[in-house]
Image (spheres, helix red, strand yellow):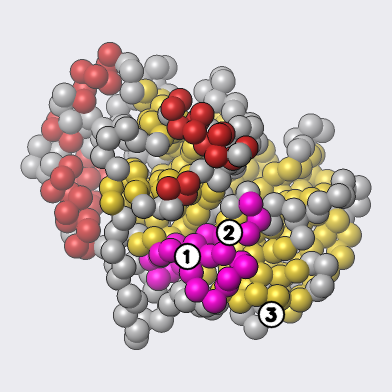
Amino acid sequence: MQGRKASLESNIQNYYIDKSLFITSNSSYAGEKMKDGLDYQGIQWNVEMKSMSRDLFRKLRATGYKPLRQFKGNEVTQHPLKKTKDNEPYYTFERFYKAPKLPAQPSQSKYTLISPNKTDLLYPYTDGFVHHSLLEFKENKIFIEPELNPTSIDSHGNLVALATSKGKLILYNMKDQYAVYNSSPLNNIYANNAVSLFQQEGSSVVKLACGGNEHSFQVYNVDINVQLIYKETMGCTLNAVRPSPDGNLLMLLKAQTAVEIFDLRAGKTIIKLKGHQDYGTSGDWHPNGMTVATGNQDCTCRIWDLRRPSQQIDILQARLGSVSNVKYSKTGSHLVMSENIDYVNIYNADNDYKEVQVVDFFGENAGLCFDGEDGNNLYFAVLLKGHNGIFEYKLRESNIMQSLSNFMF
């Protein structure tokens, strides 16, 4: 298996169109090449891999890959896969952007891609972060300092926040183009894994929540001066922190099986969601503020109603890898679940997650986000030697009207 994988990564060629920067579904070039086995990732199977079809490599990949587990002595429960939606997908392929500078991400959590609007993507690189313009099809590196090694990125307005593997916290002002805050780590052996910018309901003050391997999480006011307003010591590593839509609650995904809901007003954990069989990696809130989705190294995403937290609403089984990220669309009509490698799964939340659109490719998932405007554009990054890039999918017109209708009424 390893030999075959190496052959794929070293022998296949890049095929990009439109200024050699991206592949689109409606190009005559792509149409021609797809007859020869070109896929949207730019891999031309029938030409470069004559002895290895895409289907055969997919089967070999499925038998040869083992997801990372922490509780290695215990087998996790395998749950039935949801019915695959074969026709009329929820989201349709738009482009695959060539992005050769995408960094490897050691963390199981993948909060490393954000889209503040429909024209820009931001993602980390070794010394800072990259501003990828979708209008000009070019990348601009924002240098902060050497060997920064960011692990997580988020944005709010003009502010961009970075957590780093050396325990630092960075705030960068995109409008004025300078770092407004660069913290000194208490100890550079403690990675800062998670960062989120948010506002509490009724307040104009921007807050930042972060945490990592030092077994604590912190909350700061970051509007004018960066001021620590809360710190909570925990018994284990924090992998991800996700604020609720009203900003009053924090979902804490830790190096433990239980997911904690922390109330900032009360200053304590008010709910523990129990059911996962490994460490938490990711989570997101439905816009209704009552439903949450949690991703885990047990290769499941679980859906919960916080009004009845003792039992999950549903269990969404991954196909191959552990769950690296989960995101609800802006209206809450769809839930996207990325696996650590090869798959992104899109569920219709309005239809009780009964069907799933499966997007398959080859490589490590390196981030997932919706655009920061209407949320109809979906982006996810992929790492594969020679084929690093960012997929763009768009919500189908018929689904846009349906999701807005369900959201408003």
What is the spatial separation of the Cα atoms under label 3 and label 1, in whole angstroms? Answer: 28 Å
Identity, as a three-letter code, of the amino acid under mark 1: Ile
Q: Quadrant of the N terminus?
A: bottom left
Numbered label tally: 3
Q: Are marks 1 and 2 in contact (CB under 8 Å)?
A: yes
Which residue is found at the position 34% from the left and 39% from the top?
386
| Residue 302 is a magenta residue | yes
Q: Which residue is under mark 3?
A: 234
- Residue 301 horizontal side relative to residue 227, left or right: left
Q: Is residue 94 visible?
A: yes
Which residue is found at the position 82% from the left and 33% from the top?
176
Rendered location of residue 280, percent (x, y): 52, 69
Q: Which residue is under mark 2?
A: 291
- Quick one: 383 or 391, which is closer to the camera? 391
Q: Which residue is under mark 1?
A: 313
Q: Which residues are magenta?
A: 288-315
Which residue is found at the position 86% from the left and 49% from the top?
202
| Residue 390 is a magenta residue | no
Q: Secondary structure at mark 1?
A: loop
